[in-house]
Image (cartoon, grey):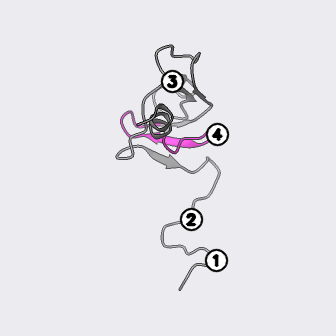
Amino acid sequence: MSAARYVAEAIGPRRVGGVYRCGYWGITYRVERIHTGPGGPIPWSEWAIAEPDLDGPMPGRTRTHCTAWDPGVDTERPDPGQRRPPPNERQEGAGA
């Protein structure tokens, strides 16, 4: 596996401004920065994510880490104030 592919898979669906739930820690966070390449905040890693906690024991705390996305437990969340339609609600234009 190439280094670029490894980094992309480790970051997963996370994007700057996106809101996610860490299944391991049970904390919701917003991605503030994603750094890839050499010279990042974690010298031994090719990538790092900075994310402030939105809830949990220390809301507002920003963590910088290189923990890979775990699709088995980590989830994307709607932005606070953004409505996510219920699963049974059809989108216009969807088949019958």
Q: Label 3 to label 4, Cα distance in Å? A: 21 Å
Residue wearing tag 1: 92
Q: Determine if the magenta segment contains residue 2.
A: no
- What amino acid does circle 3 point to? Glu
Rounded to the nearest angstrom, the CA distance separating label 1 from label 2 is 12 Å
The part of the chain drawn in magenta is: 12-27
Is label 1 in a helix, a strand or a loop?
loop
Q: Position of residue 1 (x, y in %)?
A: 40, 37
Using the numbered discs, state the Cα–Cα distance from disc 3 to disc 2 in whole angstroms: 37 Å
Picture layout, residue 90 above or below residue 40: below
* Label drawn at residue 85: 2
Closer mark to the observer between disc 4 and disc 2: 4
CA distance separating discs 1 and 4: 27 Å
| C-alpha distance separating marks 1 and 3 | 42 Å
Q: Earlier in the sequence, mark 1 or mark 4?
A: 4
Residue 47 pos. (x, y %): 52, 26
| Frontmost residue, 19 versus 26 | 19
Dot 3 corresponds to which residue? 46
Residue type at the position of mark 1 = Glu
* Separation of marks 4 and 2 at Cα, in angstroms: 20 Å
Front-lying residue, 5 or 32: 5
